[in-house]
Image (tube, grey):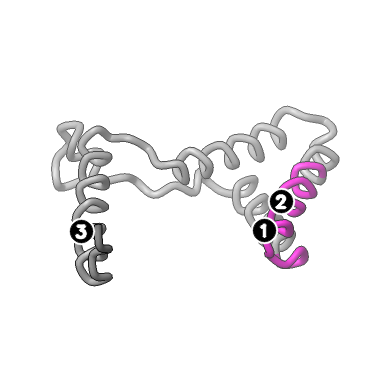
Amino acid sequence: MARMPPKQRKAEQKVRQKKTRDTAREKRRPSRDDIARLLLWQMITGVNANRRDRCEVLDRLRNELVDGLVSQGFDARESEDVFERLVHKYVNGPPPFRPKRHLKKAAGGSDAD
């Protein structure tokens, strides 16, 4: 069986991806990134609020994350900087999540939210 032309493949993929995103929105299904963001926020704020050894725990978490990012090809110093900025933002501010307006509409909320 011959391979379909790249333009046709891309067009079909675009349709499949839109259907996948629409279905996820209808089901109000979180993405892997939604879960990862929330988990990281909970880890950082939980350690900061509940641990006396918060600096050591956050340093260990930073080192493990940076090691994983470096193994993927990211720069170590830049990765540390991003982590430290997230810690500062998460510890010193309100939860950094924007409202998911499309989910509120699906739950019966009004468009005026």
Residue 46: image location, x then y, percent: 66, 32
Asked where in the image residue 39 lies, by quadrant, the reply is top right
Magenta stretch: helix, strand or loop mostly: helix
Reading the image, the residue beneath label 1 is 72
Residue 54: image location, x then y, percent: 79, 37
Reading the image, the residue beneath label 2 is 68
Q: Residue at 18%, 40% (x, y): give it.
A: 105
Residue 91: image location, x then y, percent: 64, 45
Contact, mark 1 vs mark 3 (Cβ under 8 Å): no
Q: Residue at 80%, 37% (x, y): give it.
A: 57
* Quadrant that contains the C terminus: top left
Disc 2 residue type?
Answer: Gly
Is 92 on the left-hand or right-hand side of 9? Answer: right
Contact, mark 1 vs mark 2 (Cβ under 8 Å): yes
How many C-alpha atoms fall within 10 Å of the one at disc 3: few (<14), some, or many (≥20)?
Answer: few
The segment highlighted magenta reads 60-78
User: Which disc, if any, is residue 12?
Assistant: 3
- Cα–Cα gap, marks 3 and 2: 34 Å
Q: Secondary structure at mark 1?
A: loop
Answer whether residue 66 is magenta in the image: yes
Q: Residue at 81%, 46% (x, y): give it.
A: 59
Asked where in the image residue 2 lies, by quadrant, the reply is bottom left
